Amino acid sequence: NAGVTQTPKFRILKIGQSMTLQCAQDMNHNYMYWYRQDPGMGLKLIYYSVGAGITDKGEVPNGYNVSRSTTEDFPLRLELAAPSQTSVYFCASSLDIQRAFFGQGTRLTVV
Amino acid sequence: KQEVTQIPAALSVPEGENLVLNCSFTDSAIYNLQWFRQDPGKGLTSLLLIQSSQREQTSGRLNASLDKSSGRSTLYIAASQPGDSATYLCAVRPREYGNKLVFGAGTILRVKS
């Protein structure tokens, strides 16, 4: 049982480049989330989804986009990367409002 | 707006000591509260989930309590071990927007051998 799988684990982007962070879960969870974690800070919600075809903004959505075409996948798109987007990104999933499970994270550096 | 605070920010204890980590939240209208462990450079591992109707949950040497009316939760770790060294995060799921988790900044725990 893989749980929540994120790819890639590490990435370096140049300012202005774009990329997609992949997230997949195999637990048939309806809720999925993207968080970012900056040093010394708690996790901040970027986007979330309560089911295929339904997404909504979290606290810090600017500079990001998401889509949810299937229950399993919830990719996060970064357009025109900026140094402020240097962070660790976590994807998570849950069955409704119950226990949330997290992926191992993607460490992104924008230079 | 729900805010979550964890005190202390860092804690260093000798091996074998019992310890308590604190989590407070500003709005008592929550569905549940979850404690996580995060090792350096790793993802979050769920430790315990307490529903709003529950007072405590136990798993091995870990015991988490919830006092919803006062907006507090504690994570008790018995007989601490060096392997317990990690960052511990708490998160609440507010009733106002139950499809989100609101996190505290975490407590960095170091258990010295």
Image (tube, rainbow, N blue to C red):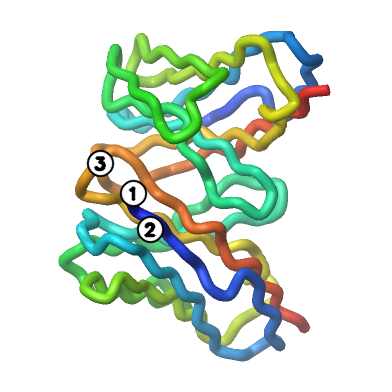
Q: Which mark is residue A99?
A: 1
Quarter of the figure that contains the N terminus of chain A: top left
Q: Amino acid at mark 3?
A: Tyr
- The answer to whether marks 1 and 3 sit on the same chain is no
Q: Amino acid at mark 2?
A: Gln
How many C-alpha atoms fall within 10 Å of the one at disc 2: few (<14), some, or many (≥20)?
Answer: many
Instruction: Please state which of residues B10 and B17 is positioned toward the viewer in this rendering.
Output: B10
* Quarter residue A37 falls in: top right
Residue depicted at x 67% and y 23%: A8
Instruction: Please state which of residues B13 and B98 is positioned toward the viewer in this rendering.
Output: B98
Considering only order in the chain, which callout, 2 or 3, is on the residue closer to the N terminus? 2
* Residue B40 visible in the picture: yes
How many C-alpha atoms fall within 10 Å of the one at disc 1: few (<14), some, or many (≥20)?
Answer: some
Which chain is mark 3 on?
B
As drawn, the residue found furthest toward the left would be B53
SS for dot 3? loop
Label 3 to label 2: alpha-carbon separation: 16 Å
Horizontal and vertical percent position of residue A73: 43, 18
Q: Pointer 3: what residue? A: B97
Residue depicted at x 51% and y 60%: B89
Label 1 to label 2: alpha-carbon separation: 7 Å
